[in-house]
Amino acid sequence: KQSDISRLELELASVSEDFRLKIEECVSLTDSLEQVRSEVQIVRNQMIQAEADARDQQESGRDVIACLEKTMADKENEWESCRTSLEAEVDSVRIELKNAAEAYKENLNKQQTTFESIILEKEEEAREMKFQQVESE
């Protein structure tokens, strides 16, 4: 039991570290996404000015926006993938912990049944000894 608990604690610590790294990755991706969104907004504002200045600048701005929007979409996809992966890992750990708890509970129930059997056996032996003592007197 103790080795199972220790093993589960080690596995939980490992999974916790993996979660921490995934969360850091998600935070980093979120920061990148916000930066890209900000850059897209800046470029959109520049495009308004570029339209007033010249047609050539307008076309160039559209290319930049398309590139940044693609980058933003890619970052959003990475973030979503990271979130989905993290949720799957959380679900997996929940199932593992539930199964471990059920196995532990089952083991405790078996031990309780064994102890109860031993107690009943000892009580029966005590009654027999008492009966034999009464008979011998």
Image (spheres, rainbow, N blue to C red):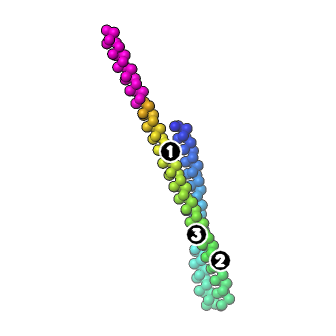
**Residue 113 pos. (x, y %):** 42, 33
Q: Which residues are magenta?
A: 116-137
Q: Using residue 15 as the reference point, say whether residue 127 is left or right of it.
A: left
Residue 41 placement: quadrant = bottom right
The secondary structure making up most of the magenta span is helix
Q: Is residue 99 visible?
A: yes
Q: Residue at x 53, y 51 (%)?
A: 93
Three-letter code, disc 3:
Glu
Q: In the image, is 136 to the left or to the right of 89?
A: left
Q: Amino acid at mark 2?
A: Cys
SS at badge 2: helix
Does residue 65 sit above or below 19 in this rendering?
below
Marks 2, 1: nearer the viewer: 1
**Mark 1 crowd level (few <14, some 14–19, many ≥20, 10 Å Cα):** some
Q: Secondary structure at mark 1?
A: helix
**Label 2 vs 1, first from the N-terminus:** 2
Q: Which residue does the image show at 47% across and 44% down from the upper left? A: 102
Name the residue at 50% across, 51% down.
Answer: 95
Q: Is residue 121 above or below residue 135?
A: below
How crowded is the residue under tag 2: few (<14 C-alpha within 10 Å), some, or many (20+)?
Answer: few
Q: Which residue is mark 3?
A: 76
The residue lying at 42 percent from left, 34 percent from top is 112
Between residue 43 and residue 91, name the one nearer to us: 91
Horizontal and vertical percent position of residue 130: 34, 16
Q: Which residue is mark 1?
A: 100
Q: CA distance from mark 3 to mark 1?
A: 36 Å
Which residue is denoted by mark 2 in the rendering? 67
